[in-house]
Image (cartoon, rainbow, N blue to C red):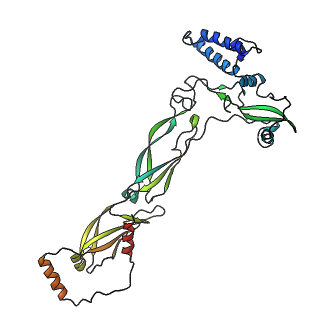
Amino acid sequence: MADHYDVLGVDKSATTDEIKKAYRRLARELHPDVNPSPEASERFKDVTHAYDVLSDPQQRERYDLGPQAGFGGGGGAAGFGDIFDAFFGGGGGGQRQGPRSRRERGQDALLRLEVDLEEIVFGTTRDIEVDTAVLCETCNGSCCAPGTSPQTCDICHGSGQIQRTVRSLLGNVMTSSPCGTCRGYGTVIPNPCPTCQGQGRVRARRTIPVDIPAGVDTGIRLQLPGQGEVGQAGGPNGDLYLEVKVRHHDIYSRDGDDLLATLEVQMADAILGTETTLQTLDGEVEVELKAGTQSADVITIRDRGITKLRGTGRGDLKIGVQVVTPTKLSHKERELIEKFASGRRSAAPELSQFQQGLFGKLRDRFLHL
């Protein structure tokens, strides 16, 4: 890389005003609005960069001394922070760390995914849209404008570190810190990509197919490795986590791998018994009600519940019976009921021990949904 003083055409002893005058003279000659040639454009960039370094007293001092030279010599005592840094990982003993990579792993993302109860009986596939960071197609993660590349930092000369020597009670101590010009990367990007502004990634919406396994429940998180946002400078993708929430169903509720429902039965059907066809989540099923069916009886239909998340097989469908007592009777219906009652010697209503049957548990569950 050309010497900055040579680029501006000044001596190393030039004053700040002399450097400024040299830059203005060259800028009037090489500015793209005045001289559109590619050679002038490249030289104008070098001139501008040289001026940025030499017009800043601190950067100029570092440039003149070089990355290995000491900054001290003034006889002042070093701060305790510098001394401890030197002995505990701050770069003491002349060791220096290499430049850090621009490529970083992308962040993980967490989204909530709502699914219907029907979808988790057997599992399903869903396409979801996410707004996330994706690889910049213009620079392909290089962060540079097409046709350009990063340049070695002329302050730290690619090391990513600036070393300085300080005097302390313990003698001369060399410390190291990230280069402020390149931020520790060891390179600078004079021509950032115009699409991603030198980040190597852009925000975009993309569609991701998701396999939702059977048996998942609210609160379970599904991990999709590598489906999170892409890292800076084209770094590896993070992971995407989907937190499942199962929507409430108007008829069915869940108890582990079992499905629960209530079947309302007319009093006559409960007394005499009947057969009926029910529409379940995965098709029709024939149900037989025996004569004398009581409220809180439970009908269990094997293997009609939810497919187990771990293991094999399915849970059961458990149907709690609720006998419906009519509240409005016609005159003829009332006569028939009275005739039926008079022909039976029914015991008078009396108290008995409270029983919390399975149907009561089902009912309580429904009330708290």
Q: Is residue 197 left or right of residue 206?
A: right
Asked if residue 52 is positioned above or below residue 319 in the image, the reply reads: above
Q: Is residue 130 left or right of residue 271?
A: right
Residue drawn at point x = 60 percent, y = 10 percent: 28
Q: Position of residue 360 (x, y in %)?
A: 37, 74
Q: Is residue 123 visible?
A: yes
Which image quarter: residue 367?
bottom left
Q: Position of residue 137 (x, y in %)?
A: 50, 31
Dividing the image into 4 quarters, which one contains the N terminus? top right
Please state the total of marks drawn on the protein image: 0
**Front residue of this view, candidates 131 and 216:** 131
Residue drawn at point x = 22 percent, y = 91 percent: 345
Q: Position of residue 170 (x, y in %)?
A: 87, 39
Which image quarter: residue 275?
bottom left
Q: Position of residue 216 (x, y in %)?
A: 45, 58
Asked if residue 110 is positioned above or below residue 164 in the image, the reply reads: below
Asked if residue 347 is positioned above or below residue 286 in the image, the reply reads: below
- Seen from this angle, which residue lies furthest left? 332
**Front residue of this view, candidates 153 and 332:** 332
Residue drawn at point x = 55 percent, y = 41 percent: 237
**Front residue of this view, candidates 158 and 341:** 341
Which image quarter: residue 336?
bottom left
Q: Is residue 303 visible?
A: no
Residue drawn at point x = 52 percent, y = 26 percent: 194
Dividing the image into 4 quarters, which one contains the C terminus? bottom left
Q: Is residue 330 left or right of residue 231?
A: left
**Front residue of this view, candidates 277 and 233:** 233
